[in-house]
């Protein structure tokens, strides 16, 4: 049954990708479908056909795959929009030299200040340096308390700066200085700001966002239409391995901080841990009533500072491990099922892909600046990994922060154009 299920899901997703193939580059819709295939295939591998919840979970995966295919067919047959490559090629010709580094510097400074205030005055500690030096602390408890415990105070708002605006502005400035070949400035920038960047993004002990930052940065080179310089790629991977390994050891997730140890841990997270968690999550909600959107509303309200959101991921963790010292997020489709039942899966899949497609159309309108393209890259990445988590999580991960970056960058450009137009009249 498992193999037959994987073949069926693979056929549905392969057909979806075939319909989207003409518009595959720099397209979050294509990335979303590809990752959904990868995640669904792995989830099915962890299902037990003898368990009734897992049998229903299989139908859930198939229904969501049908919804994805349905919207892919709609796009192919009725929208007939130009390929992403065609849109990008026509827009890149209009590109003027991007000399604005003030806006990303202001965003970077704001992100650092917000992070400093959060760690120093709200949480009361930062786990970056203690993890690196191997301090004797209960990192698991401190990690959880920093974003979901008694010290929790508006982490959803802080995340927009610490986990999203910070890496976008940081890597935008790297791209800007590299494009201008200001190598001395870039070297000084990295020596001074890279440690601060790591202090901010790793302060809670969560390894996820350093991975998101590196993955988003690497993808942004493709969106910028540039190859990743080997030295830059090696440096980013080396820094990631070092930091990720140190925190994996501190959190007792592994005893090996070597490159192979980190690769094994990352592979486990991507290929097994999240898919297994999705199975546990569905088994938990399968025994409970449909909430008809109440759980999503509670999760959304939880983004407000000082308001506790949905505790579903903690409850799933407790059902598996008998405690609340961690979280197991349910998958996107499990969350849809928990809120609206099986009948809501296909409409939700179509609606979600419609929202993602609308974000793809930004390439028609946004200026081709380093800041806009870097923000677009991170948005594509966040949409791509949506199948792993509930839909509200994309807001908490940083979609709100990305929208804020777009607004600030656009206002900055509009103000510059108005100033230039005024100067010409004078």
Image: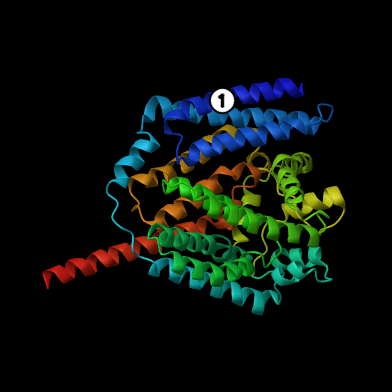
Relative vertical location of residue 224 with respect to residue 186 in this rendering, above or below: above
The one nearer the camera, 318 or 426, is: 426
Which residue sits at x=41%, y=64%?
Answer: 182
Q: Where does residue 234 sit, x and y in percent of width and height?
A: 59, 52
User: Can residue 388 be seen in the rendering of this structure?
Assistant: yes
Which structural element holds mark 1? helix
Q: Where does residue 137 sit, x and y in percent of width and height?
A: 82, 70
Q: Quadrant of the N terminus?
A: top right
Q: Where does residue 110 sit, x and y in percent of width and height?
A: 50, 72
Q: Quadrant of the C terminus?
A: bottom left
Which residue sits at x=53%, y=69%?
Answer: 111
User: Can residue 298 be seen in the rendering of this structure?
Assistant: no
Relative vertical location of residue 321 with respect to residue 283 in this rendering, above or below: below
Quadrant location of residue 154?
bottom right
Quadrant location of residue 314?
bottom right
Residue 183 falls left or right of residue 364? right
């Amino acid at each position: 049954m498992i193999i037959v299920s994987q073949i069926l899901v693979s056929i549905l997703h392969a057909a979806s990708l075939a319909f989207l193939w003409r518009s595959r580059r720099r397209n979050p819709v294509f990335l979303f479908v590809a990752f959904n295939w990868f995640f669904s295939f792995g989830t099915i591998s962890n299902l037990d056909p003898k368990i009734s919840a897992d049998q229903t979970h299989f139908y859930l995966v198939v229904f969501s795959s049908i919804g994805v295919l349905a919207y892919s067919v709609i796009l192919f047959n009725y929208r007939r929009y130009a390929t992403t490559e065609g849109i990008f090629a026509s827009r890149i010709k209009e590109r003027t030299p991007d000399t604005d580094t003030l806006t990303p510097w202001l965003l970077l400074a704001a992100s650092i200040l917000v992070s400093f205030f959060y760690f120093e005055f709200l949480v009361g500690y930062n786990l970056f340096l203690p993890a690196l030096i191997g301090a004797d602390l209960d990192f698991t408890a401190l990690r959880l308390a920093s974003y979901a415990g008694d010290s929790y105070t508006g982490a959803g708002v802080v995340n927009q700066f610490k986990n999203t605006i910070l890496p976008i502005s940081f890597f935008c400035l790297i791209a800007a200085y590299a494009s201008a070949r200001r190598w001395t400035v870039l070297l000084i920038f990295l020596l001074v700001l890279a440690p601060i960047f790591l202090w901010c993004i790793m302060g809670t002990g969560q390894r996820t966002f350093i991975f998101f930052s590196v993955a988003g940065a690497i993808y942004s080179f493709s969106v910028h239409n540039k190859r990743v310089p080997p030295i830059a790629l090696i440096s980013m991977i080396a820094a990631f391995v070092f930091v990720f390994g140190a925190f994996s050891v501190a959190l007792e997730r592994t005893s090996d901080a070597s490159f192979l140890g980190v690769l094994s841990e990352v592979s486990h997270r991507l290929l097994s841990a999240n898919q297994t968690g999705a199975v546990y999550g569905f088994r938990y909600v399968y025994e409970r009533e449909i909430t008809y959107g109440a759980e999503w509303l509670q999760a959304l309200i939880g983004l407000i500072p000082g308001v506790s959101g949905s505790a579903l991921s903690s409850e799933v963790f407790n059902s598996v491990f008998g405690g609340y010292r961690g979280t197991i997020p349910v998958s996107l489709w499990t969350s849809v099922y928990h809120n609206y039942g099986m009948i809501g899966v296909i409409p939700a899949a179509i609606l979600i892909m419609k929202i993602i497609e609308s974000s793809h159309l930004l390439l028609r309108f946004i200026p081709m600046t380093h800041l806009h393209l870097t923000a677009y890259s991170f948005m594509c990445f966040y949409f791509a990994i949506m199948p792993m988590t509930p839909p509200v999580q994309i807001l908490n991960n940083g979609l709100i922060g990305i929208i804020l970056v777009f607004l600030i960058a656009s206002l900055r450009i509009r103000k510059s154009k108005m100033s230039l137009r005024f100067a010409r009249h004078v």
